[in-house]
Amino acid sequence: MNVKRLEMLRQAHKLKKMYGSMAEEDYIEVIYELEREYGSASPSDIASILGVKPSSVTNMLRKLEEKGLVEYRKYRNPRLTEKGVELARLISEKHRKLYTILRLLGVDEERANIEAELAEHFLSDDTIDKLYRFFMECGEDLD
């Protein structure tokens, strides 16, 4: 391994630490989808979907409230604020673009959804947009 590669690894791992917001984005995304589907998002539903303990949900909801992304009161369902809805829509759009790219490449629907969910947290908005534009321009040639 050369020195340049080691430095790139160092930078990548520094960036990974900055992605602490990944969990926050997951919560925002789940709350958004639950609100759209059922009108509200109970902490128990959030815990079930994310596979976490209810106490973890409570802690995260408090953090998200401090950031102005949710309105949360103990024993009540959280609600996304306008800022939270805006973030959720951006995350959803990133997922849709990545999902579309993966489907164009022939990835099956389930795997495309799962892998888009993972990638949406690690690729920049700019990179996703460039990939999406590229695949939309040459998409017909991929069949």
Image: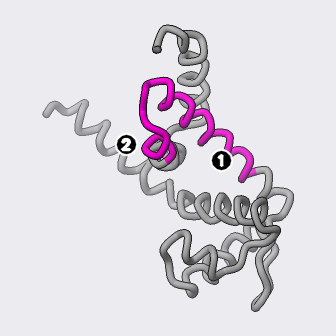
Where on the picture, by quarter, is residue 1?
Answer: top left
Tell me the residue at 47%/49% (across/down).
Answer: 114
Q: Is residue 51 magenta?
A: no
123, 95: nearer the viewer: 95
**What x and y, as percent, mark residue 64?**
70, 70
Of circles 2 and 1, which is in front? 1
Residue 61 screen position, x and y as percent: 68, 76
The magenta span reads 87-113
Q: Nearer the viewer, residue 42 or 1?
A: 42
Dot 1: within a 10 Å radius of its alpha carbon, few (fewer than 14), some, or many (20 or more) residues? some
The circle on residue 64 is none
From the viewer's side, name the closer residue of 23 and 1: 23
- How far, Cα to Cα, is label 2 from label 1? 24 Å
Q: Amino acid at mark 2?
A: Gln
- Label 2 sits on a secondary structure element that is helix
Residue at (49, 40) in percent of width and height: 109
82 to the left or right of 12? right
Q: What colour scheme does the image use? A: one colour
Res. 91 mark? 1
Q: Which residue is mark 2?
A: 11
